[in-house]
Amino acid sequence: MFLSLLAITPASVSWTPKVALVMIICNVIAIAIGKATIKYPNEGAKMPSASFFGGMSHGAMLGCTSFGHLLGMGAILGLSTRGVF
C-alpha cells in the first residue's frame, strides 16, 4: 500500500533562479493581498523596521508569507507540470 502512495506524489523540481523568482513573486502578491484585506495589520508584535515591512506586525507578515509559500508551491508545481521548468 505504501508503494502505491509513492506513485501518487508529484515529481519535485530542482532549485533554479526561475523557481526562486516565482516564489518571490508569489510572496509579494500574498503580502499585497494581506495588506489590502487584513483588518488590523499592525496589531501585535512589531517588525524591526515598520516602514520596510509596510507597517505590518510580525503575525500579519508571518501569515502573509505563509500564504505566499502556499501560492508559490502551487505555482511551481503547476508550472513544472506544464513543462515550464
Image: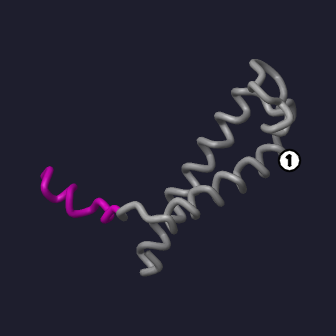
At 86% from the left and 30% from the top, the residue drawn is 40
Res 24 quadrant in image: bottom right
Instruction: Name which residue lies at 56% across and 49% down.
Output: 69
Q: Residue at x 58, y 63 (%)?
A: 21
Front-most of residues 7 and 61: 61
* Farthest-out residue, bottom: 83
Name the quadrant containing residue 10: bottom left
Q: Please, which colouring scheme is shown?
A: one colour
Pointer 1: what residue? 36
- The image shows a total of numbered marks equal to 1
- Helix, strand or loop at mark 1: helix
Report the front residue among 31 and 78. 31
Say which amino acid is labelled 1: Ala
Q: Position of residue 43 (x, y in %)?
A: 82, 23
Does the magenta-highlighted stretch encompass residue 51?
A: no
| Vertical side of 50 occupied by 33: above or below | below
Q: Position of 9 compared to 76: left or right?
A: left
Q: Residue 15's spot in the image, x, y percent?
A: 40, 60
* The one of 69 and 16 positioned closer to us in this rendering: 16
Q: Is residue 12 left or right of residue 44?
A: left
Using the image as rendered, state which of residue 36 and residue 13 is in the foreground: 13
Q: Which residues are magenta?
A: 1-12
Is residue 18 positioned above or below 39 on the image?
A: below
Left or right, residue 43 beside residue 3: right
Residue 48: % across, % down:
75, 25
Question: Does residue 6 show up magenta in the picture?
Answer: yes
Q: Quadrant of the C terminus?
A: bottom left
Tell me which residue sits at (74%, 47%) in the image: 31
Extreme residue toward the top, this view: 45
